[in-house]
Amino acid sequence: MRHFLAPAGSVVRTYATGGSPRSRLGPTLSLEHFVQRSRALSLYRHILRATRRIADPSTRADTRRFARQEFERNRAVTDLDHIRYLLSTGKTEWESMERYIDGL
């Protein structure tokens, strides 16, 4: 990192990546997007944990693969209503799948 004097006498930092000190994290999420993202991650983790109860290893792997593909397929969705819909239907589908798993 190098320091340069700005016209007003203050120090300006430059970084090796280019010029301005920007966030590498991407655009800032709104509070509602942050909450929905948290709910999506929570549902995904819940599904992965629950798949441990599936006795057959290939069925367990297929279920995890399917869940990951569905979450990845909808990763770019930004419309809050659509995100809520996806979470609601995903949760409902998983609950019906859990009833099936528990019945085995």
Image (spheres, rainbow, N blue to C red):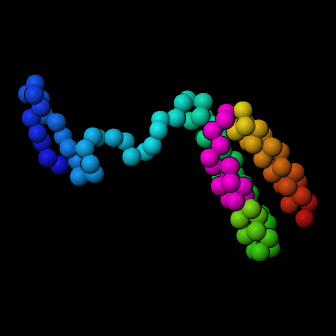
Magenta stretch in the rendered image: 67-80
What percent of the width, then of the height, locates residue 33? 59, 34
Question: Is residue 73 within the magenta segment?
Answer: yes
Left or right: where 7 falls relative to 26: left
In this rendering, the answer to whether 6 lies above or below 59 is above
Left or right: where 7 falls relative to 35: left
Question: Is residue 8 within the magenta segment?
Answer: no
Residue 31 sits in quarter = top right
Residue 37 sits in quarter = top right
In this rendering, the answer to whether 40 lies above or below 28 is below
Instruction: Identify which residue, 72 or 42, lies in the foreground.
Output: 72
Instruction: Identify which residue, 15 or 87, lies in the foreground.
Output: 15
| Tally of numbered discs | 0
| Residue located at (75% from left, 74% from top) | 57
> Is residue 42 among what the camera can see?
no
In the rendered image, which quarter contains the C terminus? bottom right
Left or right: where 13 falls relative to 25: left
What percent of the width, then of the height, locates residue 66? 74, 62
Return the residue found at the far top.
8
Left or right: where 102 falls relative to 28: right
> Is residue 63 among what the camera can see?
yes
| Residue located at (87% from left, 51% from top) | 96
In this rendering, the answer to whether 75 lies above or below 30 is below
Residue 47 sits in quarter = bottom right
| Residue located at (47% from left, 38% from top) | 27
What percent of the width, then of the height, locates residue 15? 23, 47
What percent of the width, then of the height, locates residue 103? 91, 60
In this rendering, the answer to whether 51 lies above or below 71 is below
